[in-house]
Amino acid sequence: MNVPHSEAMGVLIQADLDGELDAVQSADLALHMAGCAECQALAGRLRELKTALRTNVPRYQAPESLRRSLAAAAASAAPAAEAAGRPRRRFRLSWAPFGGFVAGAALAVVLALAVLPVMPPEANRVAGEVAAATLRAREPGHLLDRQAEAPAALAAWFQDGLGFAPPVRAVAGFALAGARLDYVHGRRTAVLVYRRDGRAVTLYVWPETHAPTPPISLAAAGLSLSYWRAGGMEFWAAGETPQDVSTFARAWRGAA
């Protein structure tokens, strides 16, 4: 039986909103949603519903006796589950209902993330979408909307297109190749692309929207990412090697 598109995607989108997808799965989902207006609208409705439930549904404090009994039950059940080899609950993305959609770039999103420190769920989802956007931009014609020019001109271009002007600056050891507009985690995003020795380092910038998060570095199969915040902006740098990304992030912050 074929699963209706909205029903199948609703389950996956809800799992992503609840932080139950890993970075690989979240990146696959982000790739699909980037080209699917129906799923973008569905995600918006689910976010609104989640917010309404958190705001309007009354909450009750469980009595201490109930919390103790539940903790005891969980502690006694854990060894039995491990002994039986019972697998943890895990969502598996199945794109069969959508024909041949996930080919090429979507299957390339293989992120074996080693995170220091452990990322909050929200940062984990954003990392997956940044990775997906970086891979998607490798397709011909997607990397740049505008070639390199004076930083002030690029900042003005971003202001016209996004309503905010991110910092645009020269970075020692890296050549500014140009810029583009992208869509990451429900927002339009400023993107600057730099090059060193033929390799690209892509910088995603948007105004701060989340609770404070410490700088994060990620090692990934085929991708490296770094996150920081400064001057009211959030930054994600993505590149092919950890050395490129860490060197770029230090140089960018040092040039401020």
Image: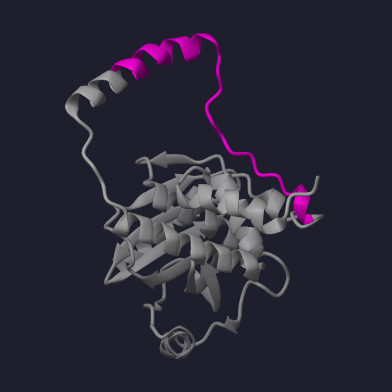
Q: Position of residue 9 (x, y in %)?
A: 63, 54
Question: Which quarter of the image is occupied by the C terminus?
Answer: bottom left
Q: Is residue 75 above or below residue 144?
A: above
Q: Is residue 4 left or right of residue 175?
A: right
Magenta-colored span: 72-98
Q: Residue at x 54, y 31 (%)?
A: 89
Q: Is residue 167 above or below residue 35?
A: below
Q: Position of residue 78 (x, y in %)?
A: 41, 16
Tell whether position 74 is magenta. Answer: yes
Q: Position of residue 87 (x, y in %)?
A: 56, 22
Q: Is residue 115 above or below residue 58?
A: above
Whether residue 224 can be seen here: no
Question: Which quarter of the image is occupied by the N terminus?
Answer: top right
Q: Is residue 207 left or right of residue 5?
A: left
Q: Using the image as rendered, state which of residue 113 and residue 74 is in the foreground.
A: 74
Whether residue 88 can be seen here: yes
Tell whether position 106 is magenta. Answer: no
Q: Residue at x 65, y 53 (%)?
A: 7
